Image (tube, rainbow, N blue to C red):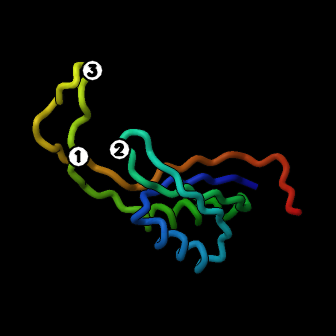
Amino acid sequence: MKLVNAIVQDKDATKLANAFVKAKIQATRLATSGGFLRSGNTTFIIAIDEERVEEVLQIIKDVSQKRKQFMVPPIGVEGERTGAFPVEIEVGGATVFTQTIDDFYQF
């Protein structure tokens, strides 16, 4: 048995949750926030048989989209902006961790 933690952008969370339901994959959905952009994201926690891990990863890969957005650079140490104009960055996609589950209990 494996534990899959998938962190996705909020824009992809509902579509991903629906894809999990359609594939009969049970997932726990948590609202989380990122550190760099301080934007909302969603973390899915999934305990799944090892044989289905690739299926889970493929669903996440298919649903999670990378996109470009503009951000204002952070304020520097002296209170000055490091850049005067917004910069375009790539956000989205998914960050996924898998771990082996030694014991699994369901009460």
> Which numbered marker is on residue 37?
2
Task: From the viewer's side, name the closer residue of 48 and 50.
Answer: 48
Task: From the viewer's side, name the closer residue of 17 and 57.
Answer: 17
Q: Residues within 10 Å of mark 1 (few under 14, many from 20)?
A: few
Q: Nearer the viewer, mark 1 or mark 3?
A: 3
User: Which residue in the structure is indicated by mark 3?
Assistant: 77
Q: Is residue 13 left or right of residue 105?
A: left
**What residue do we see at 23% from left, 46% from top?**
71
Residue 26 at x, y percent in the picture: 68, 69
Residue 80 at x, y percent in the picture: 17, 25
Q: Name the element at disc 2.
A: loop
**What residue do we see at 50% from left, 69% from top?**
16
> Which numbered marker is on residue 63?
none
Distance of label 2 from label 1 (alpha carbons):
8 Å
Of callouts 3 and 2, which one flags the residue occurring earlier in the amino acid sequence?
A: 2
Residue 34 at x, y percent in the picture: 44, 45
Q: Residues within 10 Å of mark 2 (few under 14, many from 20)?
A: few
User: Which residue in the structure is indicated by mark 1?
Assistant: 71
- Name which quarter of the figure residue 53 lies in: bottom right
Residue 84 at x, y percent in the picture: 10, 36
- Name which quarter of the figure residue 92 lies in: bottom left
Disc 1 residue type (three-letter): Met
Of callouts 2 and 1, which one flags the residue occurring earlier in the amino acid sequence?
A: 2
Task: Note whether 12 is above or below 81 in the view shown.
Answer: below
Distance of label 1 from label 3 (alpha carbons):
18 Å
Disc 3 residue type (three-letter): Val
Question: Where, quadrant-wise, is the C terminus in this rendering?
Answer: bottom right
Task: Note whether 57 is above or below 24 in the view shown.
Answer: above
